[in-house]
Image (spheres, rainbow, N blue to C red):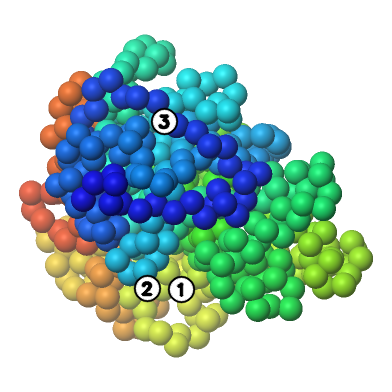
Amino acid sequence: MSTTTLHLEHRFADALPELAVDWQAEAAPGPTLLALDEELAAELGLDPAWLRTEDGLRLLTGERPPTGARPVAQGYAGHQFGGYSPRLGDGRALLLGELTDREGRLRDLHLKGSGRTPWSRGGDGLAVVGPMLREHLVSAAMHALGVPTTRSLGVVATGRAVQREQPLPGAVLARVASSHLRVGTLQYAAALDHQQPGTGLVRRVVEHAAARHHPHVLDAEVPALALLEEVTRIQAELVATWMSVGFVHGVMNTDNVTLSGETIDYGPCAFLDGFDQAAVFSSIDTGGRYAFGQQPAITQWNLARMAETLLPLVAEQAGLDQDGAVERCVAVLETFPTLYGEAYAARLAAKLGLPTGLDPEVRTALVGDLLTLMQAARVDHTGFFRDLARELRGTGGEQGTPARDRVLDLPAYDDWATRWRALGPDPDAMDAVNPAYVPRNHLLQAALDAADAGDLAPFERMLEVVTHPFEERPEWAAYALPDPAGGPFVTYCGT
C-alpha cells in the first residue's frame, strides 16, 4: 500500500463546493505514532504496518494525501451555548476525503490539529497530545459500549511544541466518521441561500445527506421533512444511549449534532461517577446548559434549529405557506420526547434485565422509582447496575447486598427490589449490557498527564480495559472504581 494506490474520493467537495475550501495540512517536524486503532484500519482496508511507516505517518498528519485526493476545510455555522456563530468551520481540521470500507460503506477520513485554515478565526489551528489521546480513547470506549460514534484511526505526535498556558507537545488526530455533515452545515447553507437566492444550497445539502445516510428520504413526498424526521429519531436514540451509560457530552452545540446520528467532538466530555442529573464537568458550562439531565431537552432545541433551516424548502416541497411549513416541522419536533422516552426506558429495562413485552406502565414506574433512588444517593452509575446483578445471583460476597448498600432510603429500595425481582430479571442479560468499565475521569486524566510527560503505558493499559468493557478481570479492579477523592471533576475544551 502507498499514497499512490490509496483512493480517496471527494464527494463532499464536489457536491457542495460553497462549503469547502481546498487546503493543505501543515508539515509535522518529527511525526511519531502515539496510538493506532488496528481494528479500524482493517475495517477501512488500510494496512496497519504501512500506517506505521514514514509515508503512513505523513498520511495521518495530512502532509502526503493520496494521489488524486482533494483535502478541504469544511464550512459550517452553529449555536454555541445558545448564541449563534454564523461562521465556524474547520478551524484546525481537514477532510482528506472519503474512502469505501470493506463492507462497502463510505467513510470520511478527517484530521484534527493539522494547522490553520481560512476558518481559524485567529487560532493557531493546532492540537496537543492530551486532548487528542482523550478523543482516541473515549471514542474507542464508546464504540465498545455500542454507542454510535466517530472513531479515531490514530494519533500522531508532530514534534512541534504548541503554546497554550504553557508549551505542550503537539499532535494530529485522524478521525473516521460516516460523514461530518451536521446541523451547523445546514445553518451555514441556509445563510448562504439567503445571501444568494437561487443556489439551492440547503436543498443540495439535504440531498447529499440523504444519499449518504438515509436514502429512503429521497423517495419521500417532502424530502426535507423526511430528513428532519429521520434525524430526530436517530438523535433521540443516540442521546438515550448516552444517558444509559452515564455519558456527558459537555458541548452540545448545533455544530456537534451530526445528521448521521454519530457522537462527535470529545472535548469537555466525562462519565458519571455518582448519578446526578445536574452533573456538569465542563469548565465553561457555568450555567449547566449541557448538564447530564439536560441532554435530551438540548437535543430537541438543537433539532428546532435544524427545522428552521428547512422551513423554506419544506414549504416549497409540500406546497405550503410559511405557517403551514412551521406547523409540519413543529409536529415532527414534538415527537422527540416520546421517541427519547421510549428509547431510554427500553435501555434502562435492558440494564435491569427485564423481559421484553412488559407492560409499559409497569416498566415506566419501575425505572422512574429507581432513578429517584439513584439520584438521592448519587450512586455510582456504572457499578450500581453490576451490583444489582450480583445481588440477584447472591454473589455479593461479604457485602451480600452491594446495590442496596449504595442507597439511602432502604425501605424504598426494598419495596422497589421486591417489585423488580417479581418480574424475573436475568442477571446474565444485565451483565451483557452493563459495563464493568467506562473511562473513569480521574484515571483518564492521570493517563493523559503521564502521556504528556512521555509515558504512554498508563494510557495503553486504560485503552485495553475500556475497549473490553464487559469483561471483568481481577487485575482490572481499580478501573471499576470511582474517584476515591470524590469532589468535582473539571474538563476543558481542548479538542
Q: Read off the residue under disc 2.
A: 350
Q: CA distance from mark 3 to mark 2?
A: 45 Å
Q: Looking at the image, can residue 215 be seen? A: yes
Q: Residue at x 56, y 73 (%)?
A: 215
Q: Residue at x 52, y 64 (%)?
A: 212
Question: Would you say 182 lies left or right of 175 here?
Answer: right
Q: Which mark is drawn over residue 233?
A: none
What is the crowding at mark 3: few (fewer than 14 residues within 10 Å), some, or many (at least 20)?
A: many
Work out which quarter of the rendered image holds the C terminus and state it: top left
Q: Residue at x 70, y 48 (%)?
A: 189
Q: CA distance from mark 1 to mark 2?
A: 6 Å
What's under tag 1, amino acid-wise?
Ala
Q: Is residue 65 above or below residue 305?
A: above
Q: Is residue 243 above or below residue 51?
A: below
Q: Read off the residue under disc 3.
A: 25
Q: Is residue 215 above or below residue 58?
A: below
Query: Which residue is at the front of the view, 208 or 414?
Result: 208
What's under tag 2, amino acid-wise?
Ala
What's under tag 3, amino acid-wise?
Ala
Q: Read off the residue under disc 1.
A: 346
Image spot of residue 69 (x, y percent) = 42, 46
